[in-house]
Amino acid sequence: MNINLTLFAQALMFAGFIWVIATKIWPPLLNAIEERQKKIADGLAAADRAKQELADADARVADEIRKARVDATQITDKAHQQAVQIVDKAKQDAIAEAARQRAAAEAEIANLSSKAKEVLRSQVANLAVKGAEKILGREIDGARHRELLDQVAGEI
Amino acid sequence: MSEHAEKLTPTEYIQHHLGHFARDLTPQVSKDGFMTIHADTMVMSFVLGLVMCLGFWLATRKATSGVPGRWQAFVEIVLEFIDGQAKDAYHGTSKLVTPIAITLFCWILLMNAMDFIPIDFIAKIAGFVGATFFGMDPHQVHWRPVPTADVNATLAMSITVFFLMIFFALRAKGIGGFVHEMFTAPFGKWMFPANILLNIVELLSKPVSLAMRLFGNMYGGEIVFLLIWVLGSVSVFGALAASVLGLAWGLFHILIVVLQAFIFMMLSIVYLSLMEEHH
């Protein structure tokens, strides 16, 4: 245990190594470490932000879908109503048309039947007259017996 | 392992291994005087310091803030651990504390770890090198591989820390504040003789205790190893016992090596921190 010049040489060496570590080793490594920490922090923040944005987008999408669904429901309801209206209108038109046509047909029928009656009536009158002529053997004066004939014709 | 011991007495064997590769720069004045340099301590500590710097430099050379390589990650873990310890113990603003802590811990750890190399391996290599390149008697070549088992190395570090403590104190308080505290703390200004005595003793005891703790542990560890190897030279049974004991002591020594490096570092930081505090 003899203390000698080695002590000073060692002290100088120690100071030299401290200097090397303090200037060449530790600062660049510390920089790298701190930069990495910053990067990691930034990355985590970005991830959080992205998550928030995703949630926002999801909410927006859900909102849009809900709105679209409501719109679609409204449109189909409207279409339904319109269809019902159209069908109703067509039904009423058809009913009216049918009634009109039936009325026309009935009028025609009545017309034809009255005409036929008229013809029949005159023919019956003629037949009656002819029958009567044959029965009576003499001609019935058409002019004189018009009143009678009409009466007969009216009775038919 | 201990071929010397077959020719040497145990005392000579131990003395041989505790001898330094010492060269007095002024041999005409005195033998082993103050101007002596312990070449083994110097070379070993310098090489180990270089290994430390080189290892760190390899990591920081391509230091990236992206995904670090394995070595960079390892160095980062070690240095961040030391940085964390330093920041826990030191509350000042100096950016020098972490490099001091890194140097102390890693350098001391490496120097202490030289204890794990069986001492006769090193003696053999040193004897061979000395005989081949310097024409020395191989048995006269002393080579202590553990620089921290040389009180010069530990005192050098603790005295450097001591000057750093003074520097930190002066920077934090100024000369006036520092001297004022030397005279007035802790008993007040009327007790200044007691104060100054106490403060000086307190101040000086710190580097001495730092250096002696590390030196004592490593020197003692080395002597225990030497005693075990002496036992190994006795007989076959002794060699077996020495293997078991050597293994056991080596395993226990791992704890001591790391612990002593850590204690030296932590206490240095705590002392530096204390010097900046106002009393």
Image (cartoon, coloured by chain):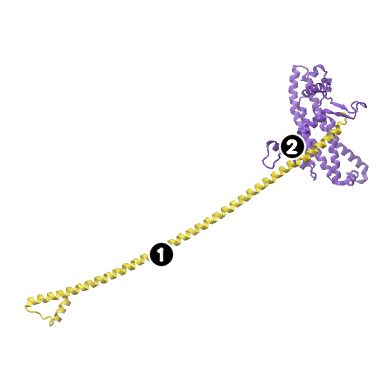
Chain colours: A yellow, B purple
Q: Is residue B140 above or below residue B191?
A: above
Image coords of residue B60 (percent x, y): 73, 39
Residue at 79% across, 41% down: B97
> Amino acid type of disc 2?
Trp
Closest to the observer: B211 or A49?
Answer: A49
Q: Is any atom of residue B38 visible in this view?
A: yes
Image coords of residue B66 (percent x, y): 67, 42
- How many numbered badges does the structure rendering display? 2
Report how far apart the C-alphas of labels 1 and 2 lie in the structure. 90 Å
- How crowded pointer 1 is (Cα within 10 Å; few <14, some 14-19, many 20+) is rated as few
Left or right of residue A96: residue B151: right
Q: Would you name the residue on which mark 1 appears?
A: A85
Image coords of residue B193 (percent x, y): 93, 42
Q: Chain of mark 2?
A: B
Q: Is residue B96 above or below residue B248?
A: below
Closest to the observer: B48 or A110?
Answer: B48
Residue at 84% across, 31% down: B151
Instruction: Say the numbered circle drawn on residue B57.
Output: 2
Q: Chain of mark 1?
A: A
> Quarter of the image holding residue B56?
top right
Q: Residue furthest bottom?
A: A144
* Nearest to viewer (mark 1 / mark 2): 2
Specify whether disc 1 shares its chain with disc 2: no
